[in-house]
Image: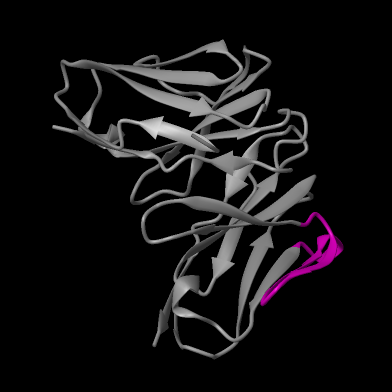
Amino acid sequence: GIQVEQSPPDLILQEGANSTLRCNFSDSVNNLQWFHQNPWGQLINLFYIPSGTKQNGRLSATTVATERYSLLYISSSQTTDSGVYFCAVELINNDMRFGAGTRLTVKP
Amino acid sequence: ETGVTQTPRHLVMGMTNKKSLKCEQHLGHNAMYWYKQSAKKPLELMFVYNFKEQTENNSVPSRFSPECPNSSHLFLHLHTLQPEDSALYLCASSPTAGDRFYEQYFGPGTRLTVT
């Protein structure tokens, strides 16, 4: 089946630093989404991004579907950015696969 | 109440118990989902309901039994669970299941421990 790999698995930043998270997928997909799960378990949509680039404040995402990867950029990180970032792909048969996540810790 | 709510937030049950998880959405959505998040595996989609009809069951054991009486409520009935079923169970909703990635909102989850 399709593989969804996220890197790095863990990331520690100082507040104010920038970072790039990566999601690779091994097959063609219909859609891709980035989520943030805060330390209390709440999962929140960040970007619905099957292709192209989107920006929302300090976050932006780029998906290059032909090369089977997506990137999530976090600029000027804040402690509230801490948590786990997941990418998820929707397969051709509408099934969904999540990556294992990148655990981000932003230190003050 | 707004968004997606789940009750209880925490549940401890023995392997012979029967319990139910409840999810309610106040967003006017027509699709609802159950996900399982265990410590050592990626998030897994368990069930999908669209307009109260179950459209997907992703090889979930029969000890998990979903129920969707209307588009706003979703239940997960649990019986004779195993310790490996301990996990965070997340409910989500979206306008429709056909475009599920678009505007999918999650509840806070129920942390289930099976002893």
Q: Percent from the top left, x then y, of residue B54?
A: 61, 14
Q: Quick check: A27 left or right of B63? A: right
Q: Percent from the top left, x then y, of residue B44?
A: 50, 39
Image quadrant in which you'd find residue A52: bottom right
Q: Residue at x 70, y 73 (%)?
A: A57
Q: Is residue A66 magenta?
A: yes
Give the colour scheme shown.
one colour
Q: Is residue B8 magenta?
A: no
Residue A51, compared with residue B108, is above or below; it is below
Residue A22, compared with residue A91, is above or below; it is below
Q: Residue at x 86, y 62 (%)?
A: A66
Image quadrant in which you'd find residue A90: top right
Q: Quick check: B89 left or right of B70? A: left
Residue A45, compared with residue B14, is above or below; it is below
Residue at the limit of the structure toward the top, as seen here: B69
Q: Residue at x 25, y 23 (%)?
A: B81
| Residue A9 shows in the view | no
Query: Which residue range is magenta in the image?
Result: A49-68
| Residue B100 shows in the view | yes
Q: Residue at x 42, y 43 (%)?
A: B108
Q: Quick check: A3 left or right of A84? A: right
Front residue (pair A41, A50): A41
Looking at the rendered image, the quarter that the N terminus of chain A falls into is top right
Looking at the rendered image, the quarter that the C terminus of chain A falls into is bottom left
Front residue (pair A53, A77): A77
